[in-house]
Amino acid sequence: MDNQEVVTDVPSNYEELKSSANRSANWRERLNAVEELGNWKNQKSIDILLHRLNTDAVHQVREAAYHKLLAFGEDVQMPERRKGELMKDVSKVLLRIKKSLPRDHKYEDFKDKLKKMRIDIYDTYEGDKGDEFDSWLEQTWSSLLRR
C-alpha cells in the first residue's frame, strides 16, 4: 500500500466520483476517480472499484482499480490486457466513418471525424493504446476497405 492514509468514511464528493468513474467517454476522468475512491475504504468505493476492474475497456483504469482493491485487502486478480476489439463493432464504425469522407481524404480528416462522431471509441482506444494510439489508428485507417 502506498503512503496515503485510507479513510473509511464516504467522501463528500462521492456522487461526483461515482459519475466520473462511469463516464464512458473520458478514461482519464475514470482513472482519477478510481485513484480518489482508492483512498476511501468503504463498501460503496469497493463496489465501484470492482466494477471498473471487471468492466472497463481501458487497461490502465482496470489496473489502477486492481491495485486499490488489493491495498484494501480484497481478493482480486490482476486484469489481463484485452486483445482484439475493446468495444463492439468498432471495425464497422470505423469503416462507416471512412466511407463518409471524400475518397481522397487524409488520415487527419478521419481522425478528426472519429473524435467528433464517436469520442467514446476514440477515448477508449487512446487510453488503451497509449503512445501507440496514432500509429494504430493510422494503420487501421489505411487497412479499412474502401468500396
Image: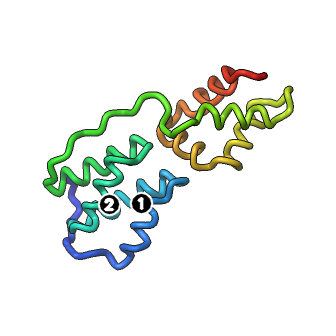
Q: Position of residue 48 (x, y in %)?
A: 32, 60
Q: Which residue is mark 1?
A: 21
Q: Position of residue 63 (x, y in %)?
A: 32, 44
Q: State the residue in front, 106 or 144.
A: 144
Q: Are marks 1 and 2 in contact (CB under 8 Å)?
A: yes
Crowding at mark 1 (Cα within 10 Å: few <14, some 14-19, many 20+): many
Residue 138: which quarter of the image?
top right
Q: Position of residue 54 (x, y in %)?
A: 32, 47
Q: Which residue is mark 2?
A: 48
Q: Is residue 112 left or right of residue 2?
A: right
Query: What amino acid is labelled 2 in the image?
Result: Ile
Instruction: Identify which residue is drawn at 32% across, 48% down.
Output: 53
Q: Position of residue 147 (x, y in %)?
A: 78, 22
Query: What amino acid is labelled 1 in the image?
Result: Ala
Q: Secondary structure at mark 2?
A: helix
Gap in angstroms between the C-alphas marked 1 and 2: 7 Å
